[in-house]
Amino acid sequence: MPAARRRNALFYGCLLLVLLIAGAEALRWAGAKHSSALPTPLAARGAAQAGPVTLTELSHAHIPAPHGMPSAHASTLTPLSGERLLAYWWAGSRESGPDVKVYSSTWNKGAWSAPREVASRASLGAQLGFGVRRIGNPVAWTDRAGTIHLYVVATGLGGWAAARIVHMVSNDEGASYTVRRVLPTSPLFNTSALVRTAPVGLADGGWWLPVYFEIGNKYPMLMAFDADGNPGSVSRIGQSTSTLQPAIVPVSSTEVRALMRDDSDQQRVQHATSHDGGATWQDLPALDLPNYSTSVAAIRLSSGQFLMLHNHVEGDASARSILRLSVSNDLRHWRTIADIAKGPAGDEFSYPSMQQVGDELHITYTWQRQAIAHHRYRIVTGGTT
Amino acid sequence: MNLPDLSLQIAYGRLGWALVAATLVVALAGVVLRTPLSRRALGMVVAACLALMLLPGEASPAFWLGLAFQYPSGVLLGCCALRLFERWHGIRRSRAMPQALAGVLAVTGALLYADTVGWLARGFYYAGFGPALMPALAVMAATACALAIARGHARGPASALLGAVALFSLLRLPSGNLWDALLDPLLWGWAMSALVVAALRKTGRRASDRIGDSESEPVPAPVLRPLAAEHFSNLKEQVGGK
C-alpha cells in the first residue's frame, strides 16, 4: 500500500474510533443524567415514638449446622415473603480453611430448614473464570421483586487483605444462585474490600451495601445499587482510617448514621453522619460504648427507635463474651435492653445480625465459633418495662 | 456505574493474560538466548500462550493469574502488544514505555494507590466510575491519541492508550472503571522500573563522562579557554553567511 493511502487509512481509522468512543460515552452520559436527575431518598421511618421498647423472648435455638463442619461464623439475615427469613453464614473446619463454604437456612413456620450449600471456592471459581482462595462473610438483600442479592467475600492471593466481593443472585428464593460479577472496589488488583453489615433500602427500590477496606488502614464505604441490582456509586464514610464494618441506619430521608467497629486504641463504638443522603460523611465523636474491635448490628424499628447489638465489656469480660442489645431515640444515648448472650472471659458471642419481621425481632450471632444462634422476640413499643 | 458482563470479562482475562505472558516469555527468551527470537518462534510463543490460557478451569494459567491479579489494564495490554510488534519487526530499542508515559503513570499510580490505602481521602478511584467527568476524560484522551497518531508523534504509546480507551468506552473493560483501563499495579511497576533504569543509565553516562573527561588531555582553566570564544564566533559567521 502506498504511504499516502496508508496515512489516510490510519487517519480515518482513528477518526472512526474517536467517533465511536464519543458516541458511546455520550449515550452513557445521557442515560446517567436521566437516571440521577434527583438524589435517591432513604426509605426512612418516622420519628421515634415515646415510651420504652419491651422485648419478650419467644424462642432461641441454634440453626442446624452442616454435617462435619465444626466452625461457623458471620451470619446474616434477609426477609422473604410470608414472614419467612433466610439466614446465611459460613462454616468449615476452621476460619479460612479450604473447605469453608457459605450455607443458608430458611425460617418458616417457627423452624429452620436443613442447611443448604450456597457458595464454595470451587463453585465461585468455576463461574468467575479465576480462582478463589478463601470464602468469608456473606451479606444478603431481598429486592422488591423478590430477587435475593447475596454478597460473599472471596479472597485472591493472600489473607483477608486480598478480599474481593462476589455478587450472586437468586430468583427462586434461595434454591439456586448465579454469579453476577465481582464488584470493582479497588485499583490494587481489586482487592481488600469486604462486607459484613446489612444493606439498607432506598425509596426507589435500590439499596446501599456497606463495604470496608482493610490493607493496613481500615475505612468504611457505601456502594449504592439501583432497583435492578446494578451498582451506581461508591463513597467513603468519613476520614477515619481505623473504623470498619459500618452498620447503617437511616434517620430521615436525607440524614443517615453509621455505627462502626473500632480498630483504634479508643476502643469505642465509632459514629459518622451524612446529611445529604450518603453523598458526603462527617465523623462524629465515638459513642460511650466499649468496642474492642467487634462487629455491631443496628436497625431502626418500625416505631422509629434504634436498636443496636454490640459486644459490651465490663469487669472480667473479654472482648466478645457479652452480646448486648441497646435502644436509643437519638443514636447518641443508649439504654440497655438485655444481654442476649453472656459468658466467662474467653467465650465468644459475636458478629450479630437482626431483622424485624412484623412485630417480631430476629437475632442471629456466632455462638462460640461453633454454631449460629437464633433468638426471636416479640416487640412491644410504648408499654412499660 | 456501568459495568461489563462477566462473560466478557472472562474472555478479556484469557486473551489479556495470554498477551502479557507472551511478552514476558519473549523478553526472557531474548535475555537468555542473547539474540532476538525469529518471527516464527515469536508466533509460536504467542500461539502457545493463547492455547494455554484458553484451557478450561484450573488448567488455564489465566485462572491463577486472575486469582492473584484479576485483570490486566488496557494500557498494559497495549504496551505488551506494542512490544511484541516491535520484536516482530526486529526493533531492539523499545518505545513501548517512553519516559514521559512512565512518568505520568508513576505519578498517577502513586496518587491513586495512596488514596486507595487511605492515606488520602479524595475518592480518586470511585471517580473513575463517574457519569460525566470520566466520559469527558475518555473522549479527550482518545482525541489526543488520535491526533498524535495522525501526526506521527509517539505513535506506539498513543495507540496503546487509544486502544485502552476504546475497550473501556465500547465494552467497559476491564472493570467499568476508567482507572482500571489506564493503570494496574503491574503496569505501574513497569513504569517505575523504566524510570529507575533511565535514571541509572543517566547516572552511569554522567559517571563515564566524568571518567572520560579526567582521562583526556588536561584543559586550561575556564578563564583561559579561547576555544569556546572561537567556536562561538565561528557559528555567528556561518549564520551570517546564510
Image (spheres, rainbow, N blue to C red):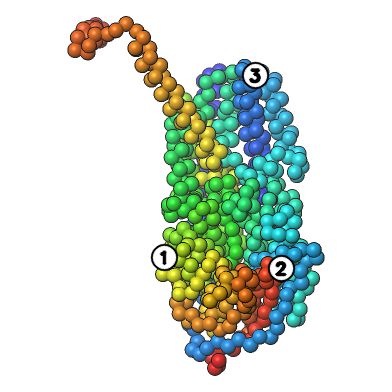
Residue A235, relative to residue A113: is it above or below?
Answer: above
- Give the left or right position of residue B43, taking residue B135 as reference: right
Separation (CA) of disc 3 from disc 2: 58 Å
Q: Which dot marks residue A282? A: 1
Determine which residue is flagged by label 2.
A370
User: The residue marked by circle 2 belongs to what chain?
Assistant: A
Q: Are marks 1 and 3 on the same chain?
A: no
Residue A83 % position (x, y): 69, 79
Q: Residue at x 62, y 30 (%)?
A: B24
Q: Which dot marks residue A177? A: none
Residue B233, relative to residue A119: is it above or below?
Answer: above
Residue B79 % position (x, y): 55, 32
User: The residue marked by circle 1 belongs to what chain?
Assistant: A
Q: Is B15 or A221 nearer to us in this picture?
A: A221
Residue A134, relative to residue A334: is it above or below?
Answer: above
Please identify, in this view, whether the residue under mark 1 or under mark 2 is nearer the observer.
2
Neighbor class of circle 3 (other Cα within 10 Å; few <14, some 14-19, many 20+) is few
Separation (CA) of disc 1 from disc 3: 59 Å
Q: Quadrant of the C terminus of chain A?
A: bottom right
Q: Are marks 1 and 2 on the same chain?
A: yes
Can residue A206 be seen here? no
Separation (CA) of disc 1 from disc 2: 38 Å
Can residue B116 be seen here? yes
Q: Element at badge 2?
A: loop
Residue A260 % position (x, y): 51, 67
Please identify, in this view, whether the residue under mark 3 or under mark 2 is nearer the observer.
2
Determine which residue is flagged by label 3.
B33
Please identify, in this view, whether the residue under mark 1 or under mark 3 is nearer the observer.
3
Give the farthest residue toward the front: A316
Neighbor class of circle 2 (other Cα within 10 Å; few <14, some 14-19, many 20+) is some
What type is the residue that disc 3 sits on? Leu
What type is the residue that disc 1 sits on? Gln
